[in-house]
Image (spheres, helix red, strand yellow):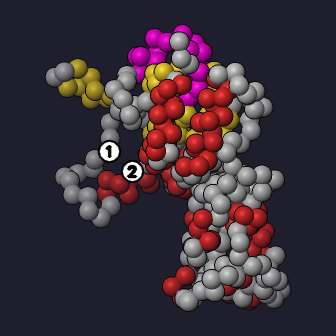
Amino acid sequence: MKPKFAMYWAASCGGCEIAVLNVDERVLALDANFDVAFWPAAMDAKYHDVEALDDGALWVTLFNGGIRTDENEHMAHLLRRKSRLLVAFGSCANEGCIPGLANLSTRAELLGAAYDGPGSEHPGPTRPQTAWDAAEGVLTLPALQPVLRTLDQVVEVDYHVPGCPPESHQIAAVLDLLIAVARGEADAPPQGVVLGASASTVCDQCPRQRDVKNLRRLARIQELLPLDVDLCLLEQNLMCAGPATRGGCDARCPRVGAPCIGCYGAAPDALDQGARLMSAIASVVEGNDAADIDHVLDGLPDPAGTFYRFGLARSLPRAHRAAFAAKDG
């Protein structure tokens, strides 16, 4: 019998699911070598199908998305128990990604923005209910947890595949490796390693020329056009997260004049991606007095979204203090 494969979509946009299909005909190798037992985005599958499996029956599960609801947490524990190998797949599972920025707000603030904000028209206060008595029985909705957590903050993870989403060549390489291990043609990598990505930074993969950086200001790209096609974007006063971000994407964004925004997570030796990026920027500011530093920082309209766009849930701060309070509504 072929080993069983599963893929699950938690708190994320679903781009990782599409990215797997973007490997084109190589996805057929997945079907040829694995029995696809659970993949809700691609097949009709129910949770009770997974619950009925023996523990460890799934050879590998690609888990994309963070843990934001009770359902996400339940599935994380269930799939961990049923899987020999559990892979945190994509930025949301590994760093929290864009949904992790919600950790800056309480649940009450999030629900208020969604249900009472502009464009919301309904009589009286409205909030989602976790249970509702209907004619067919009690309908339930997963409860929203106080903060979003990464997968390995909830369960043990065997491997990590970063990216928002992971690049197609990276996914293909990971699938090839998993197939080779399943066939006994290769040894499984050590637990906890990052698959398919680089052991260096985006800057190391970027072909742009780097000189002595003297950052005088930070500006938006439309204020700087035309850009020098060969010079480092940070040296052209454009915010670029390359110095603090793990490589693996082949620096695709900087190559075409768009700054790195950090989607591959922290550089291999960085404990906190945002702190590393702040340090990198501070080290190249031209001038030492407060006015010079303030002038540069004025070019960041959203510091939290700039330094922690993808990695807030993985960071040392992790969330605004109030968001951790379970009683905030």
Is 169 in front, or is 248? 169
Residue 138 on image: x %, y %: 27, 23
Residue 2 on image: x %, y %: 53, 17
Q: Is residue 282 left or right of residue 165?
A: right
Whole-angstrom CA distance, mark 1 to mark 2, is: 7 Å
Quadrant for residue 38, please give it.
Answer: top left
Up/down of 261 relative to 93, above or below = below
Kindly indicate whether the residue at mark 2 contacts the one at mark 1 (C-beta within 8 angstroms): yes
Q: Which residue is mark 1?
A: 127
Is 83 in front, or is 186? 186
| Element type at mark 2 | helix
Q: Which residue is mark 2?
A: 111
Quadrant for residue 265, please give it.
Answer: bottom right
Up/down of 327 relative to 213, above or below = above
Q: Residues in magenta? A: 47-61
Disc ID at residue 53: none
Report the residue at 32% width, 36% height from top: 129
Is 171 in front, or is 143? 171
Can residue 307 be seen in this snapshot? Answer: no
| Element type at mark 1 | loop
Residue 4 on image: x %, y %: 53, 20
Is 185 in front, or is 92? 185
Mark 1 burial class by Cα count in 10 Å: few <14, some 14-19, many 20+: few
Kindly identify the amino acid type of the residue bearing the numbered disc 2: Leu
Viewport quadrant of the C terminus: top left
Report the residue at 36% width, 29% height from top: 43
Report the residue at 47% width, 28% height from top: 31
Can residue 114 be seen in this snapshot? Answer: yes
Can residue 297 be found in the magenta stretch? no
Report the residue at 40% width, 16% height from top: 48
Kindly identify the amino acid type of the residue bearing the numbered disc 1: Arg
Up/down of 111 relative to 55, above or below = below
